[in-house]
């Protein structure tokens, strides 16, 4: 890694803020379309609902990571996603990071605790994808 690694606390604070933004994204991109579909008598089953959530969040995260390397909370906390070489992540890396983050976070946060023991203090999903969170320019 070529840039300094932000503290785990700073990255977790950004994730907490990110949860508020994700709530808004889901409200607009998931709930409103579901209400409209229901109004027309179209109801999605459980698996389609989960697929809708997964695809919506994938578009949100991957698009922001590939276009500037930051979501709004990451900008606020002066964080940026980078490849292990410090450059912008490649599309496959961003997609792999998104997919690996789900089990990393949902399995009791195992992938987050991983950073306590990782030699570079990276989360497990970053290690898997070959990405890292670094300070954004100006920090």
Image (cartoon, helix red, strand yellow):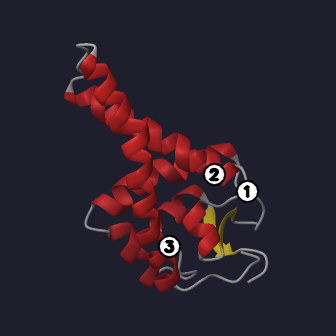
| Residue for point 55% across, 67% down | 73
| Residue for point 63% across, 44% down | 92
Which residue in the structure is indicated by mark 2?
64
| Residue for point 23% across, 20% down | 43
**Does 84 sit left or right of 48 as displayed?**
right
Q: CA distance from mark 1 to mark 3?
A: 16 Å
Q: Indicate the quadrant containing the N terminus: top left, top right, bottom left or bottom right.
A: bottom right
Residue 76's disc is none
Residue 114 point in image, percent of width and height: 41, 75
Disc 3, SS: helix
Which residue in the structure is indicated by mark 1?
68
Q: Answer with mark 1 or mark 3, whichever residue precedes in sequence.
A: 3
Which residue in the structure is indicated by mark 3?
14
Residue 133 point in image, percent of width and height: 61, 71
| Residue for point 21% across, 30% down | 46
Question: Can the viewer see residue 93?
Answer: no
Disc 1, SS: loop
Q: Answer with mark 2 or mark 3, whichever residue precedes in sequence.
A: 3
């Amino acid at each position: 890694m070529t840039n300094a690694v932000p503290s785990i606390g700073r990255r977790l604070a950004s994730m907490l803020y990110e949860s508020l933004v994700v709530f808004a994204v889901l409200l607009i991109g998931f709930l409103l379309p579901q209400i409209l579909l229901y109004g027309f008598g179209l109801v999605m089953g459980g698996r389609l609902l989960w697929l809708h959530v997964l695809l919506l969040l994938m578009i949100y995260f991957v698009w922001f990571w590939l276009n500037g390397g930051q979501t709004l909370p990451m900008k606020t906390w002066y964080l940026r996603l980078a490849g292990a070489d410090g450059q912008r992540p490649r599309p496959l890396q961003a997609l792999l990071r998104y997919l690996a983050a789900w089990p990393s976070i949902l399995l009791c946060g195992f992938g987050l605790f991983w950073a306590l023991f990782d030699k570079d203090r990276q989360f497990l999903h970053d290690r898997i994808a070959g990405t890292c969170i670094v300070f954004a320019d100006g920090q």
